[in-house]
Amino acid sequence: MLRESTRPWPIWCTDSTHADLTRGNPILKVLEHFCGVDRRRIDLDQEFAIDEVTDSNGGRCPWRASRALFAEPRVARARDNVR
């Protein structure tokens, strides 16, 4: 269903996540082929906001995640997790 969009999907991600989603599991390349991707870079050294998200948490989505099985091995850093 993602490929059926009539406009590019806005994708917020860090550089390392973007690399995983274009090389290890090339879902972003597939979406680019069908409908396009509007990548919005998240710099972990700066605060960011997702204007389209409105919730009681101010658009912040705190979570911890482990590396996906398809992701290339890399040294995990504490700042890789958005809080």
Image: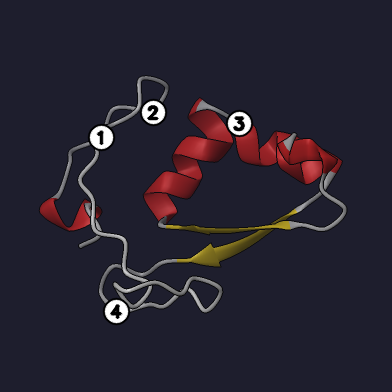
Percent of width and height locating residue 47:
30, 79
Instruction: Classify 10 Å Cα crowding around label 4: few (below 14), some (14-19), many (20 and above).
Output: few
Q: Do residues under tags 4 and 1 come within 8 Å of each other at their CB atoms? A: no
Q: Secondary structure at mark 1?
A: loop
Q: Which residue is mark 1?
A: 74
Earlier-in-chain disc, 4 versus 2: 4
Residue to which mark 4 is pinned: 46
Where residue 57 appears, as percent x and y from the top left, is 29, 72
Residue 17: image location, x then y, percent? 42, 46
Q: Residue 11 sits in which quadrant?
A: bottom right
- The residue at the far right in this view is 6
Q: Is residue 75 left or right of residue 32?
A: left
Chain-order first, disc 3 or disc 2: 3
Q: Residues within 10 Å of mark 1 (few under 14, many from 20)?
A: few
Asked whether disc 4 touches disc 2, contact meaning CB atoms under 8 Å apart, the reply is no
Q: Which residue is mark 3?
A: 26
- Residue at image x 55%, y 66%? 40
Discs 1/2, front? 2
